[in-house]
Amino acid sequence: MTRTWTLPVLLALGGTVVATGLMSRGNPVAGVVLLLFFVLLAVVNSPLLFPRSLSAAEAQRRSEADGRPVVYWRPGCTYCQRLRIQLGRQARQLHWVDIWRDPAGAAAVRAVNDGDETVPTVFVAGRPYTNPTPAWVREHLPAGR
């Protein structure tokens, strides 16, 4: 769990230090703008942007029951962020597994990506697809949801 928050915390702390320096030199507007920018970066790189992660076993069980795809992701991954942001509200229809929190999820990703933890890896009906486009993922959501 600590690893998932390392980058966001470092971004927030770094932004605070730089902003404090700017403010102490008499430039409060630039300090506030820079601080807001770093806080935004911290949020985008945090698990807060994603729906609640499940264990790989739970996500697979739910996917078998409701037909929704399972997305394996990790915090800080720009491709995962792009997928999440471009899916918008539809991202809640997917089952998300944070591979940094779930060793079984990381193993599942390595098993289908030649030993690499390449994310996002999306499983649809048990078949893996590595780094699909958001449009492709949308096409594979169950109808009527």
Image (cartoon, rainbow, N blue to C red):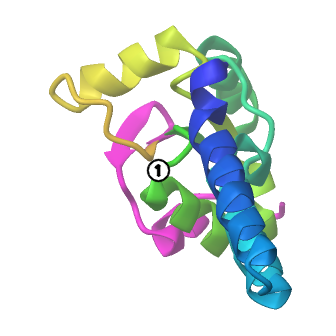
Relative image position of residue 61 (x, y in whole percent): 68, 18
Q: Residue at x 43, y 68 (%)?
A: 133
Q: Is residue 122 found left or right of 16 in the rendered image? A: left
So how many labels did they put on this image?
1
Q: Residue at x 46, y 50 (%)?
A: 77
Relative image position of residue 48 (x, y in whole percent): 79, 47
| Along the viewing direction, whichever of 126 and 36 lies nearer the viewer | 36
Q: Amino acid at mark 1?
A: Cys
Note whether 22 is above or below 102 in the view shown: below
- Answer yes or no: is residue 10 visible: yes
Q: Secondary structure at mark 1?
A: loop
Note whether 58 is above or below 74 in the view shown: above
| Quadrant the C terminus occupies | bottom right
Tell me the residue that label 1 is attached to.
77
Q: Is residue 52 found left or right of 132 in the rendered image? A: right
Q: Is residue 137 magenta?
A: yes
- Answer yes or no: is residue 40 visible: no
Q: Residue furthest left?
A: 114
| Along the viewing direction, whichever of 46 and 113 lies nearer the viewer | 46
| Quadrant the N terminus occupies | top right
| Along the viewing direction, whichever of 78 and 124 lies nearer the viewer | 78
Q: Is residue 80 magenta?
A: no
Note whether 143 is above or below 94 in the view shown: below
Q: Is residue 16 found left or right of 118 in the rendered image? A: right
Mark 1 surroundings within 10 Å by alpha-carbon count, few (fewer than 14), some (14 through 19), many (20 or more) = some
Relative image position of residue 102 (x, y in whole percent): 57, 15
Which range is magenta?
A: 122-145
Give residue 116's quadrant in the image.
top left
Relative image position of residue 60 (x, y in whole percent): 61, 22
Q: Residue at x 63, y 61 (%)?
A: 84
Note whether 1 is above or below 131 in the view shown: above
